[in-house]
Image: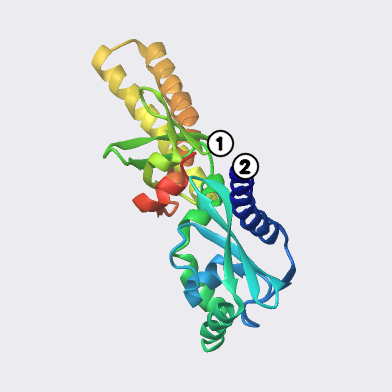
Amino acid sequence: MMVKLSNSLKIIKFILPVCFLAIVFGQDGEIIPLSQKVGLTLDAEENLFYNVYSDIDGFESAQFYEISIQTVIARISYVQYSQQKTSKRKYKMMDFLRMKEAVDVQPIITVEDRLLVRENLTYLQTDEILSGIQEDQYVIIYHRSGRRIRGTLKEYGNKNLIIQTPVSLEKIPIWDMESISYREGINYHSNWKFPLYAFSALAGLILAESWNKQTRPNIDSVWYYRFLGSMAGLLAGSEAFQTFNVLTSPKTFFALTPEEMDRLKE
């Protein structure tokens, strides 16, 4: 009987602290700002600028809850393998106040500061950047394996790039992409439209005339091929004009570090 009672007391001593921690971590309490310079939510740019959580890869945001006069709980959101996850950290009030003081003594983050810091938060913008790339344009992808994949971007979705190469249709997960070269927009040079159409028609006519000289046909065939070459040149003018617009548009280069690529993996 005494043995059973002793075992029961041991179980109770083990369960009670676990239950207490579960209750503490399960409740929210009152949300409090880390600093007036931050507000109620510490975002990724502020975290990097003030160096609050330098040990959390893929940090997205954090909020702080006062559970009691002695305890503060931080609820932290972060990105891991392209999935949003959360974790909690418990602080004694004195530790939280020290963290608050470390932020308070620093200058207020400005818009310019945010723009500079944002360059180091590529992993939070990857999906938005790739979704904004105009489809049906020529891109160059540098694969983590060392391959260079050239082709037309047909589609981006579910964190996969669909590229039409000259020989196959490639499906590339974004975590296998080291970098991508593309054009943010296609310029439209309307003043070049007529010259390019005329040049294409002239090129077709010259090609047909060259054929005439080699074959020496009679006069009807000569003019037939001239007309055929001109029409072929005009039809090619549209493609030549579109190609000219693409080639004269500025390129954009977007790259990820190996660590950032791994955060995007499902």
Instruction: Locate the N terminus by quadrant.
Output: top right
Q: Nearer the viewer, residue 225 or 249?
A: 249
**Mark earlier in primary sequence (1, 2):** 2
- Coordinates of residue 8 in the picture (x, y in percent): 63, 46
Q: Nearer the viewer, residue 175 or 225?
A: 175
Give the Cα distance between marks 1 and 2.
57 Å
Looking at the picture, which amino acid does disc 1 mark?
A: Asn
Q: Is residue 177 left or right of residue 127?
A: left
Q: Secondary structure at mark 1?
A: loop
With respect to residue 68, does 98 lie above or below? below
Q: Which residue is mark 1?
A: 158
Q: Secondary structure at mark 2?
A: helix
Q: Is there any visible trace of residue 182 in the rendered image?
A: no
Q: Residue at x 36, y 26 (%)?
A: 166
Looking at the picture, which amino acid does disc 2 mark?
A: Lys
Q: Is residue 27 left or right of residue 100?
A: right
